[in-house]
Amino acid sequence: MKTILSNIALLALMAAVLVLADPLGLIRGADKYPSGSISRAEGLQNWQTFYAVASHPRCVNCHADSRPMWSGPSYGATRPHGMNVQGGESRSGAETLPCSTCHAALPAQNPEANRLPHTAPRIADAWQMAPREAAWFGRSSREICEQLKDPARNGDRTIAEVAAHIGHDLVLRWAWAPGGTREPAPHSLAETQDALLKWGAAGTPCPG
Ligand code: HEC
Ligand code: HEC
């Protein structure tokens, strides 16, 4: 009896570890939509869902060319980041003024820390611009689509890996709960990942 009980406890523990290691079920869900199971039209619709997220200020402000951007209703006019902030080759301002000077990392993810409007957003991770290959600001839906499916520009990832990656990213947690007067990115993290997986299963079609 004792062994049965401890076996049950062990199984429960293993199940809990699996769920915790993969909270959104992405590792297990990578083959949720087998390749070809989604039509091209549905794939394009799902790309549109992802594009609505990717082109939102909470994403493009960091996914820009050489300087981060200030755009979105909380900024009024769209303009490059104030104080002549530059991403530099490091993408973290290391060559000039490091992002961490103002966007200091928090010990833990805490939306309360970003409650005051117009303060520099802070997350439990290093704040820096996205790689140049992933610059989206001012680009069309088609251009971003071509970039994201190109292994040379997406960190050599499959689409399932891109979807899993955005699930692990603390910046993305912030983008959906930015605090203060900043509007959150549309949809949700889970919907965004699902859209990417469906777009991938449809063969990554891009709008014309
Ligand atoms: C604080 C700046 C910042 C913000 C805001 C941000 N990102 Fe990123 N993003 C990064 C950095 C840095 C990387 C590179 C990290 C890596 O690849 O490990 C990255 C990489 C990515 C990638 C990997 C694929 C690729 O093409 O390289 C995706 C997808 C992505 N971000 C999506 C988003 C989305 C969607 C949002 C908004 C909901 C967002 N990001 C907001 C900084 C940011
Ligand atoms: C001198 C301080 C300072 C430095 C250095 C700095 N920032 Fe900022 N950053 C701010 C402030 C303040 C805001 C908010 C401005 C507002 O809301 O009016 C901000 C906002 C942002 C935003 C917009 C977030 C959003 O979507 O609302 C991004 C993106 C950003 N910073 C990226 C960076 C990056 C990347 C670096 C380094 C290359 C950097 N910043 C360096 C002070 C700084």
Image (cartoon, rainbow, N blue to C red):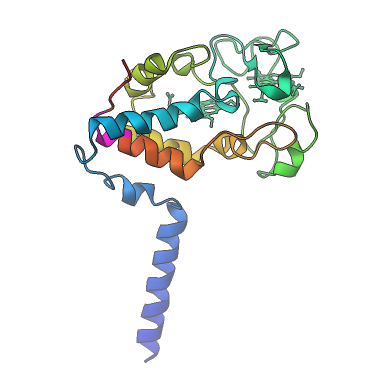
Quarter of the view holding residue 205:
top left
Q: Residue at x 61, y 19 (%)?
A: 92
Residue 15: in magenta span: no
Residue 123 on image: x %, y %? 66, 36
Q: Residue at x 68, y 18 (%)?
A: 98
Q: In this view, does 96 lie to the left or right of 49?
A: right
Relative depth, front residue between 130 and 52? 52
Instruction: Relative to 141, say whether 123 is above or below.
Output: below
Relative depth, front residue between 121 and 7? 121
Image-quarter location of ligand 2: top right
Q: Which residue is drawn at 59% across and 10% down?
A: 88
Residue 163 on image: x %, y %? 40, 37
Relative depth, front residue between 173 and 207? 207
Q: Which residue is drawn at 19% across and 37% down?
A: 36
Q: Is the magenta stretch mostly helix, strand or loop?
A: helix
Residue 201: in magenta span: yes
Residue extent of the magenta highlight: 199-203
Quarter of the view holding residue 115:
top right
Identity of the residue furthest to the bottom in this view: 1
Relative depth, front residue between 163 and 156? 163
Identity of the residue furthest to the right in this view: 116
Q: In this view, does 126 lie to the left or right of 7?
A: right
Q: Is residue 93 visible?
A: no
Residue 106 on image: x %, y %? 70, 38
Instruction: Relative to 2, say whether 189 is above or below.
Output: above
Q: Is residue 185 left or right of residue 166?
A: right
